[in-house]
Image: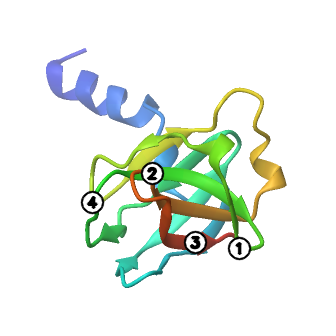
């Protein structure tokens, strides 16, 4: 097998990243409290994915979390939002069933305020 065939075989057998989209429940971002956030969020199993079209205008201390029917759940915080644009992936905390939630949130932990919600269909 020459180098070109090896690389082609490797590319064909490598799984797509989990945040590629299309495998879970999707929702569209909407900014709240004066923020502009666009793009798509996905809940797929225990993963929460911000897809490649995600764009956030920025704020201090943003975290990714879950909510239900307009109520943020602080027990679901998955970690800081490190990239304000593009795809990223988060894992729900141990013991959290993502099926119990119908929203993905961007939450400012420092000021205890919501920045964006993506209602999940």
N-term-proximal mark, 2 vs 4: 4
**Which residue corresponds to the image point at 81% horizontal and 51% vertical from the top-left?**
99
The residue wearing badge 4 is: 84
* Separation of residues labelled 1 and 3 (CA atoms): 10 Å
Circle 3 — which element? Answer: strand
N-term-proximal mark, 3 vs 2: 2
* Separation of residues labelled 3 and 4 (CA atoms): 15 Å
Judged from this view, the residue extending furthest toward the bottom is: 34
The residue wearing badge 2 is: 109
N-term-proximal mark, 3 vs 4: 4
Where's the N terminus, which quadrant?
top left
Q: Residues within 10 Å of mark 3 (few under 14, many from 20)?
A: many
Q: Residues within 10 Å of mark 1 (few under 14, many from 20)?
A: few
| Mark 1 touches mark 2? (CB < 8 Å) | no
The label nearer to you, 2 versus 4, is 2
Circle 1 — which element? Answer: loop
The residue wearing badge 3 is: 118
């Amino acid at each position: 097998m020459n180098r070109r065939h090896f690389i082609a075989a490797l590319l064909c057998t490598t799984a797509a990243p989990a945040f590629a989209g299309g495998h879970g429940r999707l929702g569209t971002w909407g900014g709240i409290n004066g923020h502009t956030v666009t793009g798509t969020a996905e809940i797929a199993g225990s993963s929460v994915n911000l897809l490649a079209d995600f764009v956030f205008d920025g704020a201090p201390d943003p975290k990714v979390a879950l909510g239900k029917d307009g109520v943020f759940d602080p027990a679901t915080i998955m970690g800081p939002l490190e990239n304000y644009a593009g795809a990223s992936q988060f894992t729900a905390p141990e013991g959290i069933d993502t099926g119990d939630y119908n929203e993905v949130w961007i939450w400012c932990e420092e000021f205890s305020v919501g920045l964006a919600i993506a209602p999940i269909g």
